[in-house]
């Protein structure tokens, strides 16, 4: 069965898979080979499970100046992922969303 690992992960409720940094780098290099200024002056929005662990966030942050990015926004609605720090403060958006506004 070719997807045995995925099936086992689904059964174990361990289905968090992350895109590897090398895969992101390979794909982005293909864009850059086509047009070296493809990201210049652009804002990159990255919806992530957790921006602190996201390889996409890491890749674009490390190449911010090289690519000439205007802005990098890495966002998530993973309130529980911040609890381990002990000083999590919800944003204004989180507070108003919780109230149903």
Image: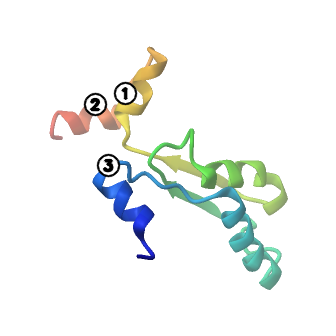
Q: Is residue 67 above or below residue 93?
A: below
How many tags in the picture?
3
Question: Circle 1 is placed at which residue position?
Answer: 90
Left or right of 55? Residue 47 is: left
Around disc 2, counting alpha carbons within 10 Å, would you say few (fewer than 14), some (14 to 19), or many (20 or more)? few
Residue 36 is tagged as none
Mark 3 to mark 1 CA distance (whole Å): 31 Å
- Whether tag 1 and tag 2 are in contact, CB under 8 A, the answer is yes
Left or right of 83? Residue 99 is: left
In percent of width and height, residue 47 lies at: 46, 55
Mark 2 to mark 3 CA distance (whole Å): 33 Å
Give the image quarter of residue 27. Answer: bottom right
Label 3, secondary structure: give it: loop
Residue 95 is tagged as 2
- Whether tag 2 and tag 3 are in contact, CB under 8 A, the answer is no
Label 2, secondary structure: give it: helix
Residue 12 is tagged as 3
In percent of width and height, residue 80 lies at: 35, 31
């Amino acid at each position: 069965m070719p997807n045995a690992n995925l099936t086992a992960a689904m059964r174990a409720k361990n289905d968090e898979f992350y895109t590897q940094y090398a895969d992101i780098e390979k794909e982005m290099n293909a864009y850059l080979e086509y047009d070296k200024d493809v990201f210049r002056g652009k804002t990159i929005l990255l919806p992530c499970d957790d921006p602190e662990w996201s390889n996409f966030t890491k890749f674009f942050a490390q190449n911010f100046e090289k690519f000439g990015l205007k802005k990098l926004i890495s966002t998530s609605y993973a309130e529980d992922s911040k609890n381990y720090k002990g000083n999590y403060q919800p944003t204004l958006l989180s507070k108003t969303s919780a109230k149903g506004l």
